[in-house]
Amino acid sequence: MKVQPIGNPPTSMKKFLIVLAVSLISLRGISIAGDAADGPQPPPYDGLGSDMGNLFRTSNAESRSISAENPTGEKGRGGMATQGLGAGPARDLGKTWKISPAMAIAPHSTLTLADVDGPGAIQQIWMTPPLEKCRFYILRIYWDGETNPSVECPLGDFFACGWGKVCQISSLPVCVNPHSAFNCYWQMPFRKHCKITLENLDDAKMVIFYQINYTVTKVPDDAAYFHAQFRRQNPVSPKGLYTILDGVEGTGQYVGTYLAYGVHSTGWWGEGEIKFYIDGDKDFPTICGTGTEDYFCGSYDFDTDGPDGKSHYTEFSTPYSGLAQVIRPDGHYDSQTRFGLYRWHIRDPIRFRKNLKVTIQDLGWQSGGRYMQLQDDIASVAFWYQTEPHKKFPPLPTRDDLELH
């Protein structure tokens, strides 16, 4: 019997094998896709953390806004006022024509700006207060029915503009725009309730234009609460050491610092190191800076050479840090140099699990190349998120101690 040599299979067999292989691969792909579809799926988008990367996504979040034209923020309740600061100019036009664009706050009284139920999150705040007395206007925010505020701060300092004079700020969480528009974009989630008040410590009435934009949505289980605390010492005591924040207990992250720094001496004032004492640190911190201008992401005294060939302080405002304000002596009543500095820890939050303390040295130079402990005028705002409850803040300085001199 003649055995046929083994050769290549006929063309029809090749086609059959190719079709079979493609079919098997396709079936396997369908199986994998089916397995993925049946597996755990990411939760639906909640409308929080809006940025350029997720603006196209839809969600069940609902937009709300509080202003003098809609003090409750309720749906379909805006522009209904019949009385307000704009009633005179609107007398020929009537209802819906800017009758209540702003609110007046009587001397030594408090206005509730927002009083809303959750869950939700504050996403943007805009205000235009009289600038020169902003230290006398105290912003407070209370979360979920708490008695002690989580935010307590003079209005200007909260918006990184604490010297009673406007300065342009172009950062991510805080913007100050002409003429005197304060804007903040810190995201502030709450679960049950949010209350925002503004106290007028001044002897005169003040008028405030404002808009508080928030969303009604489910808040993630791991969302912490926004906090901001103001402090001031003039002069700094003990000599050379200023405490920005102390007494924080809980879990969270520190996200920003604003300093209103007024110097009482000539020469460079910013050799001081910032120090973060984290989770039980005692004598020595976990994070230690190398100089004031270094912490605020500048270098070498913030100096650049001007057209006159001399070094000058150079203002700057960037997304994460800035020397946004330098108030120079005018040879008359403005006799001291004053600075406004901010540093936002958005890309590098300082995380803590148990407790946190933050200090900065007030340090300059004296003869012989030696450091000198200073006693300048320093006011600060510390910004952080943490789990509740939080410890009660130290008492706010009295009106006389808040006043700018």
Image: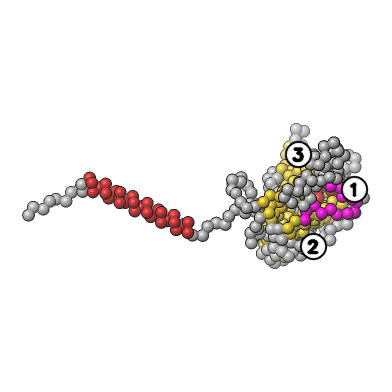
Numbered disc total = 3
- Local packing at callout 1 (Cα closer than 10 Å; few below 14, some 14-19, many 20+) is few
Q: How far apart are marks 3 and 2 (CA)?
A: 46 Å
Display colour scheme: secondary structure
Residue 239: x and y, percent?
82, 58
On the question of residue 218 being in view, the answer is yes
Q: Nearer the viewer, residue 103 or 288?
A: 103
* Residue 311, disc: 3
Assess whether residue 231 is covered by the magenta stretch. Answer: no
Q: Is residue 164 toward the left or the right of residue 73 in the image?
A: right
Q: Which of 82 and 365 is in front in this view?
A: 82
On the question of residue 131 being in view, the answer is no
Can you tell which quarter of the image residue 192 is in? bottom right
Q: Is residue 224 toward the left or the right of residue 22 in the image?
A: right
Which is nearer the N-term, disc 3 or disc 1?
A: 1
Q: Quadrant of the N terminus?
A: bottom left
* Residue 134, disc: none
**At numbered mark 3, what does the secondary structure look like: helix, strand or loop?**
strand
Q: Is residue 97 toward the left or the right of residue 388 in the image?
A: right
- Classify 318 as above or below 249: above
| Residue drawn at point x = 86 percent, y = 57 percent | 397
Residue 170: x and y, percent?
71, 43
Where does label 2 land, which residue?
148
Q: Distance between the residues labelled 1 and 2?
A: 26 Å
Q: Give the range drawn in magenta.
A: 102-115
